[in-house]
């Protein structure tokens, strides 16, 4: 399954991609969604830190949260992320 979400800009897309998936370790780094305020997501990482990511709008936030929840619940696993300007394509199995 894959989804493409639009971020606020290219920097936010690169940040989201790097927070989501560590290619060298082949693991998902996000452990929880701590908060959603408008188009802003606050996520918790495995290292216990929290980071904010700005998506394009609230619809993109809903799409992302719905897609990533099964990964957080360990039902699925992210296998790749690709950045296309301000968009991030996320693939899970």
Image: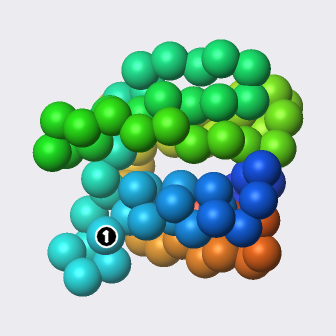
* Quadrant housing residue 55: top right
Examine the rendered structure and indicate whether residue 50 appears above or below residue 71. Answer: above
Examine the rendered structure and indicate whether residue 42 appears above or below residue 9. Answer: above
Q: Which quarter of the rendered picture does the N terminus lie within?
A: bottom right
Residue drawn where x is 82% and y is 44% of the image:
56
Q: Position of residue 35 (x, y in %)?
A: 50, 18
Choose between 64 and 84: the one closer to the eye. 84
Please state if 79 lies on the left or on the right of 47 as rendered. right
Please state if 74 lies on the left or on the right of 14 as rendered. left
Residue drawn where x is 40% and y is 49% of the image:
76
Q: Secondary structure at mark 1?
A: strand
Please state if 3 lies on the left or on the right of 91 as rendered. right
Q: How is the image coloured?
A: rainbow
Task: Work out whether residue 78 can be spotted.
Answer: no
Q: Position of residue 78 (x, y in %)?
A: 42, 61
Task: Work out whether residue 35 can be spotted.
Answer: yes
Q: Position of residue 30 (x, y in %)?
A: 34, 44
- Total number of numbered labels? 1
The 10 Å Cα crowd at callout 1, few under 14, some 14 to 19, many 20 or more, is some
Q: Position of residue 65 (x, y in %)?
A: 60, 32
Examine the rendered structure and indicate whether residue 22 appears above or below residue 61. Answer: below
Most distant residue in the left direction: 47
Residue to which mark 1 is pinned? 22
Residue drawn where x is 41% and y is 20% of the image:
34
* Quadrant housing residue 75: top left
Residue drawn where x is 77% and y is 50% of the image:
8
Please state if 9 lies on the left or on the right of 79 as rendered. right
């Amino acid at each position: 399954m894959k989804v493409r979400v639009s971020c606020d800009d290219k920097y936010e897309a690169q940040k989201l991609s790097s927070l989501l998936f560590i290619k060298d370790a082949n693991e998902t780094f996000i452990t929880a969604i701590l908060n959603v305020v408008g188009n802003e997501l606050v996520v918790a990482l495995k290292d216990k830190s929290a980071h904010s990511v700005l998506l394009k709008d609230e619809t993109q936030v809903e799409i992302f949260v719905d897609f990533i929840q099964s990964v957080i619940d360990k039902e699925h696993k992210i296998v790749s992320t690709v950045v296309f300007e301000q968009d991030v394509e996320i693939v899970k199995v």
